[in-house]
Amino acid sequence: TDLYTVSKSAMFDDGDARGLNMNPSGTATSSTVAAISLWTKRANLGTDQRPFSIRVDGNNYFSIYYNTSNQLDFTINNGGATILQRVTTRVFRDTSAWHNIVVIINQANGTQADRVKIFYDGVQIPNTSAGFGTNTCSLDGSSALNFLSDSSAVHHVGGDGFSQHYDGYVAEVVHLDGANSGNSLDASSFGQVDTSTNRWVAKDVSGLTFGTNGYYLEF
């Protein structure tokens, strides 16, 4: 668009089981506050696929995945306890266009349900039964999240340690480690409305504060 041009993306084929993996390994700026944004364009439907995850082990991870019913599932396991599982009531079958997923995590938020906020194409999915058929959020407001604090955590784009590989395209992946995330951010930090088409499109994120383990994958 005239607002901002994205010229590159990464393509993943679930048949060849490849992905991008990285271990930031530094001491995190925050173990309780983070933000993740990515753009996806799906290809295959109806299979478990994880376009993004951060994993220490089977007991400590964060993941975004499309399930076999084409719903989005957001999960945090911390020390073996599932402290977040939100599965959308809505299904996502569009393979023709790009869509933006944003997750804001902030343990310090005074409202428990808002300690994780999830946005799709700029609109927050309500933390109610209207938004999520499965809706567990038991973040306690203070404890470290191991997938953020453990230096062995591996960040996966397109493929992951769960063997549920993504099929499609991914672009503009952003992870903010503390700093600018939390209550100061929402989806408008990562996208904007193109007034000529009324579509949600990407924006320049270079002005954000990424923290020690944060990154921007422009591809």
Image (spheres, rainbow, N blue to C red):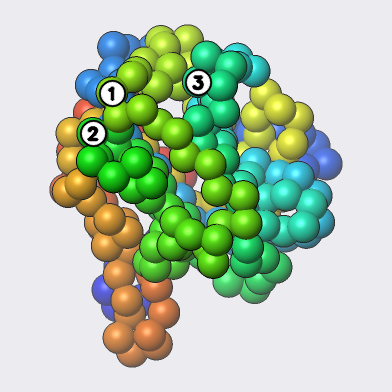
Side of 209 where 147 appears, left or right:
right
Which quadrant of the figure contains the N terminus? bottom left
Residue kind at label 3, given as amino acid type: Asn
- Seen from the viewer's position, the closer of residues 43 and 1 is 43
Cα–Cα gap, marks 2 and 1:
7 Å
State the image coordinates of residue 136 (x, y, percent, origin top left). 53, 41
Callouts 1 and 3 close, C-beta under 8 Å: no
- Label 3 CA crowd tier, 10 Å (few <14, some 14–19, many 20+): many
Is residue 117 at least partly visible in the picture? yes
State the residue position of label 2: 108
State the image coordinates of residue 158 (x, y, percent, origin top left). 62, 40
State the residue position of label 1: 142
- Seen from the viewer's position, the closer of residues 28 and 12 is 28
Give the quadrant of residue 160. top right
Earlier in the chain: of badge 2 and badge 3, it is 3
Residue placed at 58% from the left, 71% from the top?
97
